[in-house]
Image (tube, coloured by chain):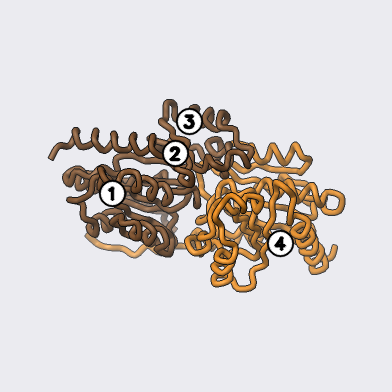
Chain colours: A orange, B brown
Amino acid sequence: MTKKIIPIVENILSANEKVALENRARLDSAGVFSVNFMASPGAGKTSLILALFDSLKDKVRMGMIDGDLASSIDADKAAEAGIPSVQINTGGQCHLDAVMVRDALGKLPLAETDLLIVENVGNLVCPAAFQLGTHFNLLVASVPEGDDKPYKYPSMYRNVQALVVNKTDLLPYIPFKMDYFLRGVEALNPGLVSFPLSCRTGEGVPAFADWITAQVQHGRKKNPD
Amino acid sequence: MTKKIIPIVENILSANEKVALENRARLDSAGVFSVNFMASPGAGKTSLILALFDSLKDKVRMGMIDGDLASSIDADKAAEAGIPSVQINTGGQCHLDAVMVRDALGKLPLAETDLLIVENVGNLVCPAAFQLGTHFNLLVASVPEGDDKPYKYPSMYRNVQALVVNKTDLLPYIPFKMDYFLRGVEALNPGLVSFPLSCRTGEGVPAFADWITAQVQHGRKKNPD
C-alpha cells in the first residue's frame, strides 16, 4: 500500500484565532470591552456577573454571552436581572470557540454595550486553549474546589490575565490555605492580579467592580469613538 | 483542484473502545473489580478514595490509578495512606483514555487487588465520552457546585451508573436544594443509585462503602477464580 502525506491546509486553532481576531476588531470598533470568564462548574461565574451588574449598572452598560452544554438557566437569570444576554448551547462541546461567539455578537446591542462578559462552559481544561476575541481571560476559582488547583490545572492558571477567588464566606468551614493556593498561582503566572471575594455576602466585590470599571475606561481611551 | 474522499480507517472512539475491552478482560481475569471516578475539579474524588480505604482496608484490597494534567498530589496522598497507586500525567489532555489505563495496569499488583479505582481528570464534560474498561462509571458531585449541575452537564449525568453527592456538611451554608438536584438526575438517568455523604465528617460514608463492597462481591461471583 502506498503511503501518502496529506497536507493539512489549516489547523483548527489557527482557524479559530482568525475568527477571534475578527471578533476583537468588531468589539473594538463598537467600543465594547470584553472579558472571557472561565471556571470549574459551579465556581460562581453567573453569580459574579450578577454581582457585577448590581454594582455597575448605573455607570457601565453590560452585556453577556452565556455558554453551556445545555439549558438556558444562566442566561435566563441574567436576562431577568436586566442584562442583555445571548445563550449559546454548545451541544456537548466542552468549550466555546470564536465562531460561536461571532454568531452571538450579531444578536447583542453592541452599540449600547460598554462591557461584554462571555461566560464559558464550566471546565478547567479545554476553554484555556481557545481564544474568543475578548480583551482578556479571567478565571473564577472558588474556595471549595481546594487550594491545590493551580498545581493540578496549570494550563488554565497560566492562560488568564486576572483571577477571582470566590466563596471566601466558606473559608471557616473548609481547610483551604490561601497562602499555598496563591504561591501556586504566582509560580505559574507571576504578578497575576487576584480578587478574593464572596458573591454571596458581597465582601470584596466592590474592589473587583472598581478594577473592571478601570479596565473598561482604559480600553475606551485606547479606542476612542 | 480535484477533491478526494479520504476514508477514515478507524475513529478515535472505537480504537479507544477496543483497548477498553482488553483492559476489562485483563481486570476480569485478575479478579479485579474497577470503577471510574469522574467529577468536577475539587469535588472530592481523592477524599472519597481515602475515606473508602479507611473504611474497607481490613476486608477489600484497594488499588488506585490517578489521572491529572500535572503533579502527583493525589497519588502521593493515596500512597501515603498505603494504597498501591499509579500516577498518570496526561500532559494537558482533558480526560483519561483506555491506552493510558492499560499502561498503568502493568504497574499495579493486580493479583493482590480486589477493587481498583481510576480517578479521572477533574472535568464534567470530556471524560464521559471515553470508556476505560472499568466495570462502571461513578460521578462525584458536590454541594458547593450548585443544584443545577445535572441540567447543565447532562452528558456526564447520563453516562454514570452511580452517584455520590459529597460535602453535605456544607448544606447549612449554601442554598442547595437537594430535591431540585435529584429531580434533574432522575430525568436524565432514572433510578440512578445515589449516596449523599460527607468525606469530611464521615456521614454517609459507611452506606456507600457497604454498597461498593457488595458490588465487588457480586463481581467476584460473576467471575470466580
Residue A209, image x, y percentages: 77, 57
At x 53%, y 30%, the residue is B184
Disc 2 or disc 1, which is closer to the eye? 1
Gap between marks 2 and 1 measured at Cα:
19 Å
Residue type at numbered disc 3: Leu
Disc 3 or disc 4, which is closer to the eye? 3
Residue type at numbered disc 4: Ala
Residue at numbered disc 1: B62
Image-quadrant location for residue A115: bottom right
Residue type at numbered disc 1: Met
At x 50%, y 37%, the residue is B154
At x 44%, y 39%, the residue is B164
Q: Are marks 2 and 1 in contact (CB under 8 Å)?
A: no
Residue at numbered disc 4: A25
Mark 3 vs mark 2: same chain? yes
Above or below, B13 relative to A129 = above
The kind of secondary structure element at disc 2 is: strand
- Say few, some or many: other residues with alpha carbon within 10 Å of mark 3 (under 14 / 14 to 19 / 20 or more): some
Residue at numbered disc 2: B164
From this viewpoint, is residue B21 visible? no
Seen from the viewer's position, the closer of residues A56 and A221 is A56
Disc 3 or disc 1, which is closer to the eye? 1
From this viewpoint, is residue B128 visible? yes
Gap between marks 3 and 1 measured at Cα:
31 Å
Mark 2 vs mark 1: same chain? yes
The subunit letter for the residue under badge 3 reads B
Residue B39, image x, y percentages: 46, 46
Image quadrant containing the C terminus of chain A = bottom right
- Say few, some or many: other residues with alpha carbon within 10 Å of mark 1 (under 14 / 14 to 19 / 20 or more): many
Q: Which mark is residue B188?
A: 3
The kind of secondary structure element at disc 1 is: strand
